[in-house]
């Protein structure tokens, strides 16, 4: 049996100093642990990596603490527009949705695009039409409303800036969520889901739903889910770059992930991090911000839940 493992993230960056109380930190860790444990349970029962990453991401989407599903940030139009993607490293099948609203679990819609449509990526009205055909329930805007995120938006709504999921000033926190897993058969998968960036312009699409930028999986190399300043992660083709360094330069998962996050993406001023797993169950979780909400668990007994460096 292959070593199986899962890693999850709830976004890179940290809350502005003074906002992180011991109680809040405990809540973040509780929600991370719930997602980690459920995803790991799928793997330990012999489930697929795809099932595990979808399971874990759904739990993070249901938590208002993270910027995905419930608790997504507000657009410049005071609405929510969510992006998500999922990829199967065994088949290279992928599914993605962008600019959707009212869907409780965007990652499940992305999986349905992968499995039930002949396309890879559906956006906006078309994605919503597809959801309707599959009888997805449309939640009211109030389901996604979060007081803290609304405040973040009020602070910058009359400006031209758009910002990461955190209140004002320099400290930034990206609340995107993601999961990567390697199952007992050595198949890997990745999923990423986000509300994007506060005050983003209508129609803005980040890296999270883009195959190769914010999300990628290939059994030959690795599965990757990113979080960070999407515009830079798109330009750096970050997730695929990790896989390329492994494939063409024969780097280890750890070395390739660090090269991309601590060197290549920094060179173009991108900040953020990623989680990655290879087909042997190894895990890497590098980030170039002060922290990254993250957790991992392997069948060899490694377990970690952490926020700061
Ligand atoms: N990468 C996401 C985006 O740009 C933001 C995040 O990671 O929180 O949409």
Image (cartoon, rainbow, N blue to C red):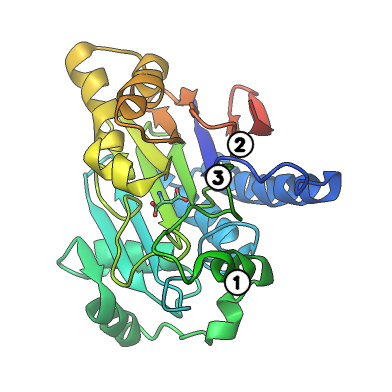
Residue 92 occupies quadrant: top left
Determine whether the beta carbon of the residue marked 2 sits less than 8 angstroms from the nearest atom of ligand 1. no
Q: Are marks 3 and 2 in contact (CB under 8 Å)?
A: no
Q: Secondary structure at mark 3?
A: loop
Q: Residues within 10 Å of mark 3 (few under 14, many from 20)?
A: many
Q: What residue sits right under mark 2 in the picture?
A: 295
Task: Locate residue 3, reporting x and y percent.
Answer: 49, 25
User: Which x, y percent locates residue 124?
Assistant: 27, 76
Tell me which numbered mark, 3 or 1, is placed earlier along the sequence. 1
Q: Quadrant of the C terminus?
A: top right
Residue depth check, mark 1 versus mark 2: number of the one nearer the observer: 1
Q: Nearer the viewer, residue 163 or 307?
A: 163
Mark found first going from the N terminus, 3 or 2 = 3
Report whether residue 46 is seen. yes
Image position, residue 39 (x, y; %): 56, 47
Above or below — where is 30 with respect to 134? Answer: above
Q: Which residue is located at x 60 percent, y 76 percent?
A: 145
Secondary structure at numbered mark 1: helix
**Nearer the N terminus, badge 1 or badge 2?**
1
Give how far across and how far down residue 257 sits, in percent: 38, 23
The residue shown at (47%, 55%) is 163
Above or below: residue 273 compared with residue 84:
above
Question: Quadrant of the rendered structure where residue 115 is?
Answer: bottom left
Question: What is the quadrant of residue 155 in the picture?
Answer: bottom right
Which residue does the numbered mark 1 point to in the structure image? Answer: 150
For marks 1 and 2, give the CA distance.
27 Å
Examine the rendered structure and indicate whether residue 241 appears above or below residue 15. Answer: above
């Amino acid at each position: 049996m292959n070593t199986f493992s899962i890693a999850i993230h709830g976004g890179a960056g940290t809350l502005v100093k003074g906002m992180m109380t011991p109680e809040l930190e405990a809540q973040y860790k509780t929600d991370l642990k719930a997602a980690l444990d459920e995803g790991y349970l799928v793997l330990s029962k012999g489930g697929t990596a795809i099932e595990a990453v979808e399971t874990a991401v759904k739990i993070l989407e249901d938590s208002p603490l993270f910027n995905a599903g419930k608790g997504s940030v507000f657009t410049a139009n005071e609405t929510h527009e969510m992006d998500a993607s999922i990829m199967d490293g065994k088949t290279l099948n992928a599914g993605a949705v962008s600019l959707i609203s009212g869907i409780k679990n965007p990652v499940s819609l992305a999986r349905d695009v992968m499995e039930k449509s002949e396309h890879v990526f559906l956006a906006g009205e078309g994605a919503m039409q597809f959801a309707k055909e599959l009888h997805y329930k449309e939640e009211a805007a109030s389901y996604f409303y979060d007081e803290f995120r609304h405040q973040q938006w009020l602070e910058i709504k009359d400006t031209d800036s758009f910002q990461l999921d955190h209140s004002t000033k320099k400290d930034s926190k990206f609340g995107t969520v993601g999961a990567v897993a390697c199952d007992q058969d050595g198949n890997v998968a990745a999923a990423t889901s986000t509300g994007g960036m506060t005050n983003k312009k209508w129609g803005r699409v980040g890296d999270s739903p883009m195959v190769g930028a914010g999300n990628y999986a290939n059994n030959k190399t690795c599965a990757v889910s990113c979080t960070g300043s999407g515009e830079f992660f798109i330009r750096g083709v970050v997730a695929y770059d990790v896989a390329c360094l492994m494939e063409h330069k024969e780097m280890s998962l750890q070395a390739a992930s660090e090269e991309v996050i601590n060197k290549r993406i920094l060179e173009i001023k991108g900040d953020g991090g990623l989680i990655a797993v290879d087909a042997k169950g190894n895990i890497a979780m590098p980030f170039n911000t002060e922290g990254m909400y993250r957790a991992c668990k392997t069948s060899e007994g490694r377990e970690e839940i952490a926020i700061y460096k």
